[in-house]
Amino acid sequence: MAKKIAVDPLMDKLVSLCKRRGFVFQSSEIYGGLGSCWDYGPLGVELKNNIKRSWWEAMTHRRDDIEGLDAAILMHPQVWITSGHVEGFTDPLVDCKKCKHRFRADQIDGKTCPDCGGELTEPRMFNLMFKTFMGPVEEESAVVYMRPETAQGIYVNFLNVLQPSRQKVPFGIAQIGKAFRNEITPGNFIFRTREFEQMEMQFFVHPSEDQKWFDYWKEQRWNWYLEIGIRPEKLRWHEHEKAELAHYAKAAYDIEYEFSFGWKEIEGIHNRTDFDLSRHTKATGKDLSYFDQERNEKYIPYIIETSAGADRSTLVTLVDAYAEEEVKGENRVVLRLSPKIAPIKAAVFPLVKKDGMPEVADKIYHELKRHFKVFYDDGGAVGRRYRRMDEAGTPYCITVDGQTLQDETVTVRDRDTMEQTRNKIGELVGIIGAKVK
Ligand code: ATP
């Protein structure tokens, strides 16, 4: 029986735009695709990289108190026993006896199937970690896990980072990397996938200062979404109730975004207390406590975690930027991406492919390319070229026309207002650079 798919016109349009313009493709598409796996195309990889770069700059380069890390995906299997994931990283799975659809029991109400009303099986706990084998022999002792979160790579490296960086508590460690979860019900395009990328930061604090830093990081993380251009009215906080809290957390708030399929988490901010460092200390016998010279006190720091998804952030920027409008009786689709994260910053067009215009446009293109990602297009009517760039989210289009050859000016068209101004060629780097940096 074919799986019933909820109709979501906005997401359908976005998925098709992403394919058409080269943002995101289904993985292994020519083989029929692989469930919930997606590949980022030429524009998608630029957008996602720009988002990751913005996060990395906000979390590390612009601060003195956070260090970067890039830990391996595969870790000692004992790490996941210590962290509680082998025992507790599970979701309750139920199957419909009639239509055979599968659900997460905690995501559906009631005892009957939401798709066909059939009877459901008793919930079975299902561990979300992917397993594989290390070395040539596939036996129990060779099992390793694909990390389900990047955070543990930070905890086990606490001392390794602390010592050479000469940081003092309070300080943090930031990491961007892949994580894997064998989700029962992936879906909604790149919202929930089985392979995804996280942008996580663990901030180590004195236990008495946990609330202060928790509040601080809530504010910082909220503001970052505004920085990458997300409309504030589409964001809200969700506080986890006691019963909802993960096994390690004292307090947790999610930043949620209002998608067409409802308000959903895009980032979690957690007070993980001394849970992780204490457990790793106990399991390994390696003392992960910290001697605070100013306080003359030895303690295991509390951890305030900010955990965001790079793919989910990418989806949020696309959804939030997508707009359709009528212009002179025609439908225009435009991605109003912030110029800071737009994949292409400017496109350069010769109005026509003759009269010396391509030569001048080519020269401008090569000059701008030294500063930011630009695109050259001489194919088809200029109006169509503008439309293509609107769909790609390119904030500026520069057109070389007859007047250019006389006075060295070009038109600069703004994606959002569609207004055109005339500017000197020599000023372009400055004008566009100021808006995209
Ligand atoms: P849920 O309850 O929805 O499964 P979670 O609370 O387990 O999510 P966290 O463990 O807090 O999620 O993960 C932190 C962030 O990592 C999420 O806010 C999200 O941005 C991202 N993330 C988590 N799981 C996925 C996934 N399967 N696909 C894409 N991104 C994910």
Image (tube, rainbow, N blue to C red):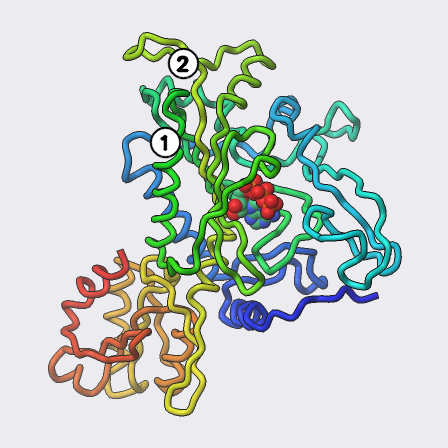
Residue drawn at (47%, 53%) of the image: 313
Q: Is residue 351 above or below residue 437?
A: below
* Residue 423 lies in quadrant: bottom left
Q: Secondary structure at mark 1?
A: helix
Q: Position of residue 274 (x, y in %)?
A: 49, 21
Residue drawn at (34%, 42%) of the image: 220
Of tags 2 and 1, which is closer to the observer? 1
Q: Is 214 on the left or on the right of 436, as rendered?
A: right
Q: Which residue is mark 1?
A: 213
Residue type at mark 2: give it.
Tyr
Residue drawn at (57%, 18%) of the image: 279
Residue lying farthest left? 407
Q: Is 206 on the left or on the right of 153, as rendered?
A: left
Q: Position of residue 231 (x, y in %)?
A: 38, 61
**As rendered, which of 248 and 288 lies closer to the eye?**
248
Q: Is residue 255 visible?
A: yes
Q: Which residue is mark 2?
A: 290
Q: Residues within 10 Å of mark 2 (few under 14, many from 20)?
A: some
Q: Is residue 157 above or below residue 192?
A: above
